[in-house]
Amino acid sequence: MELKNLRTFQAVVDQGSYQKAAERLGYTQSTITVQIQQLEGELGVPLFERVGRRMVLTEAGERVLPQARELLLAADRLLECGRTERIPTGTLRVDMAETLLCYRMQPVIRSFRERAPQVRLIVRSCNCMQIPLGVRTGACDLGVGYDMDWNRESLEVESVGSYDIVLLASPDFTEPDFTTPGQQKGVSLVTDEPDSIFRRRLEDYLRRREIELDVTLELWSIETIKRCVMSNLGFTYLPRFVAEEELADGRLVELKAPISGVPAPALCAWRKGRWVTPAMELFLELLRQGLGGALTGGACAPGQGPAAETACRLR
């Protein structure tokens, strides 16, 4: 069984199509097709079926995937044994919460690139429910985000910081009382997707206080959310660090309420029992330093936050 066919199989799963896998691996699409056909022939089962434009794993493919990932990790470990020095090489895939990636991770990524130039680093912006799933399935090597009941039975989880989550609004916001229960407020919550930890925490608080809002504006970019709030289209609930400049110059204000200022732990996770590669070890070391305050600078400029799917693809 060819390792290259297993790597191609893994790439198709991670990228969602033959074409994207070919672009990532530097193959033609026909080569991807041939390699998958060879692997299916050796295993005697179909691994994919097409659903719309995506290639989706069959039931047999679901069973094969974790074993294929383990074989590839074992092969990487064997290659590492042949090296006299533990120089980080290969590919490192990291999934992160958008707020951390956009406002806290640039120094970490920059230092990693300087110290591990031979590593192909792929960083994606994901919500905090997707991150542990990606770690468990092997779609990423490390996951960095906020705690949403991450399963410690299958994951190694390390705390890498804690950040206050605050209510933010324009200075012209007219209904700042989010303490008194039983209100019907004619204001809008400006927030991101339903699986956001911040949105879930706030909506739970509002239900307990029986505070009803006018409408929810659901956006998918932290910078867009901030700009809408600064334009007084509503209020939001985000880590204080994403709005440090706007709070300092008065474009945003922090509202006082029991829910505002409550800390959220930031975590890093990897699959329990897996081999921690030199690249992972280095990234973890820099992550502890970076989120602990040892590294500074490098924040995104306004309007230049990460895209919803792939935030950084660095070679």
Image (cartoon, grey):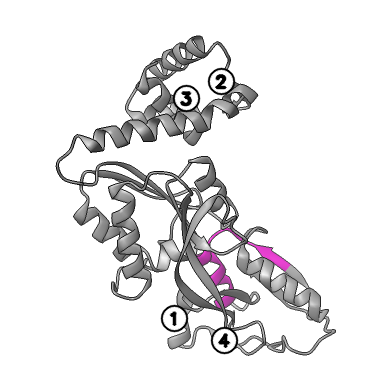
Q: Which residue is mark 2?
A: 47
Is residue 132 on the magenta stretch? no
**Horizontal side of residue 211 vs 220, given as left or right:** right
| Left or right relative to 103: residue 214 | right
Q: Residue 18 — which label?
A: 3
Amino acid type, label 4:
Glu
Could you say where residue 290 lies in the image, as x and y percent from the top left?
33, 69
N-terminal label among 2 and 1: 2
| C-alpha separation, residue under disc 4 versus residue under disc 3 | 48 Å
Query: Along the line of sight, which residue is nearer the eye, 177 or 232?
Result: 177
Badge 4 density bin: few <14, some 14–19, many ≥20, Cα 10 Å: many
Residue 103 at x, y percent in the picture: 41, 68
Tell me the tag on residue 211: none
Question: Type of residue at label 3?
Answer: Tyr
Q: Looking at the image, is mark 1 or mark 3 earlier in the sequence?
A: 3
Mark 2 or 3, closer to the camera: 2
Inspect this view and state whether residue 158 appears.
yes
Residue 193 location (% of width, % of height): 63, 58
Secondary element under disc 4, as helix, strand or loop, is strand
* Residue 200: quadrant of the picture: bottom right
Q: Reading the chain from its start, which is encountered first: label 4 or label 2? A: 2
| Disc marking residue 244 | 1
Give me the C-alpha separation between circle 1 and circle 3: 43 Å
What's the amino acid at mark 2?
Leu
Marks 2,3: beta carbons within 8 A? no
Q: How far apart, in angstroms, are the residues tagged by discs 4 and 2? A: 52 Å
Decide if residue 46 is on the left or right side of residue 111.
Answer: right
Q: Is residue 244 left or right of residue 289?
A: right
User: Is 113 rendered above or below residue 298?
Assistant: above
Q: Is residue 20 visible?
A: no
Residue range corresponding to the magenta coloring: 216-230
Q: Magenta includes 224?
A: yes
